[in-house]
Image (tube, rainbow, N blue to C red):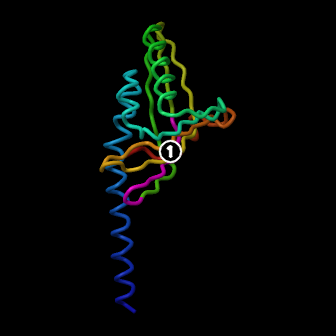
Amino acid sequence: MKKIILLSLVFFQSVGFSQSSQTTEINEQVWKPFIKYYNAHNATEFLALHSKDVIRSPRDNKAIWNWDKYLERQSSGDQRDLKENSQRKLELRFSERISNTDRAIDIGVYKSTYIFYDGKKESYYGRFHVVLRKENEVWKILVDTDSSEGGIIGEKEFMQAKSME
């Protein structure tokens, strides 16, 4: 009986370590550069974090985009923001993270703060659901959806989720 308990503890610790190791790898390969390139208005590098098979759905807009459409939309938004001299700061917090060796699901809340040329700030919130896939040993975003859920997502929900690290 003691052997079974000991083996169970070792198994669950190794599963926890594996999950933590994959989460760290995903943070380094996807989420940290995602935030960096989004904030820098760099659509090309931002989209490089996504699979060429990506499915992007900004659900508030009832839209579904492929990689080409996503790049087009991201680029035009970046150019508009740069022309208007506005900055943005994206922050992500996570409520659920599940992964195995080559697939992962991350669910959480984002906060995107826009800083306009006159110094005025506006923050927007939404819940995201992302499916990731390891391609050639690198994590890529395969499915990316988000929604404000009718405007009910806010600072409270953002703070209830866990920080990336």
Quick one: 11 or 62, which is closer to the camera? 62
Q: Could you tell me which residue is drawn at 37 percent across and 50 percent down?
A: 134
The residue where tag 1 is placed is: 130
Q: Which residue lies furthest to the bottom in this view?
A: 1
For the image, the number of numbered tags is 1
Residue visible at 48% across and 7% down in the picture: 118
Where does residue 146 sit, x and y in percent of width and height?
Answer: 57, 37
Q: Give, as a single range, the part of the protein colored magenta.
A: 100-110
Quick one: label 1, few (<14), some, or many (20+) residues within 10 Å? some
The image quadrant where one finds the N terminus is bottom left
Q: Is residue 114 left or right of residue 36?
A: right
SS class, disc 1: strand
Q: Residue 20, percent across and down?
A: 35, 57
Residue plotted at (45% across, 30% down) = 90
Residue 78 placement (x, y as % from top left): 45, 18
Question: Which amino acid lies under the numbered mark 1 shown in the image of this protein?
Answer: Val
